Image (cartoon, rainbow, N blue to C red):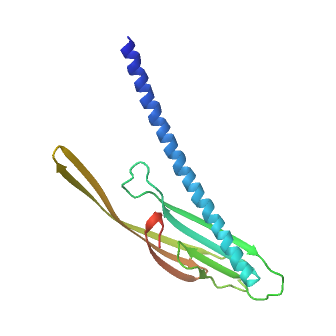
Amino acid sequence: MLQIKKAQAATELVVLGTLAIVAFSFLINYSEKLNRQQANIQQTFRAALKESRGTNNSASYTKVVFRRMANVATPMELGQLQNFSSSANVLWADGTNTDDPTSKYKLNDAAAISIPYRENPAEGTVEESHSSFINTVKTTTTFTKQQSGGNIVTTKTLDAKDTLNAKIDISGHEYSFTHELGPGGKYH
């Protein structure tokens, strides 16, 4: 009778422990995603503030970032591709500058591009942007077995090449980017 209760307690511990690990895994992934989004929002605002202050005028800044999240369930595979985007508009002016406001667009860690300012858009015209992103992933997994004496060591190696191609049309001006996945899950 005592052995049955010990077995039941061990089974309950295994089930509850597994559920706790799954819950913590979800919580870690979700908090990492929120952290990256918040960092992107802050970086975009700081860039708009710097641009606005430097030109003594209004500035608009849009930043789109792609990142690979960590894969907690299977660490030797690529994680999920996440898209983080944010925009900021800042007015830092004393009224003496009559130049057109600046507008910038930045994808990943590429240099920001200036978006042409349309002085008198047609009445009722809405500024539009269209984008398409193609992600190409090539992976090779290699298993190596080394046996010496009574010891067996198995090594798994992941070689991955991840390319992100982007075509962006902003108010009739087309831009294209090609970025490769680098360290830390960032595209360069």
Quadrant of res 6: top left
From the viewer's perspective, tell me whether residue 27 is left or right of residue 93: left
- The percent position of residue 43, horizontal first and vertical second, equals 63, 68
Q: Against 183, is 28 above or below?
A: above
Question: Residue visible at 37% across and 56% down?
Answer: 77
Question: Residue visible at 64% across and 64% down?
Answer: 41
From the viewer's perspective, tell me whether residue 81 is left or right of residue 123: left
- The percent position of residue 111, horizontal first and vertical second, equals 55, 79
* Quadrant placement of the N terminus: top left
Q: Nearer the viewer, residue 34 or 117?
A: 34
Q: Against 79, is 162 above or below?
A: below
Q: Nearer the viewer, residue 7 or 121?
A: 7
From the viewer's perspective, tell me whether residue 20 is left or right of residue 47: left
Q: Is residue 123 visible?
A: no
Quadrant of res 129: bottom right
Most extreme residue toward the left, as rendered? 149
Q: Against 69, is 168 above or below?
A: below
- The percent position of residue 51, horizontal first and vertical second, equals 69, 79
Most extreme residue toward the top, as rendered? 1
Q: Is residue 40 visible?
A: yes
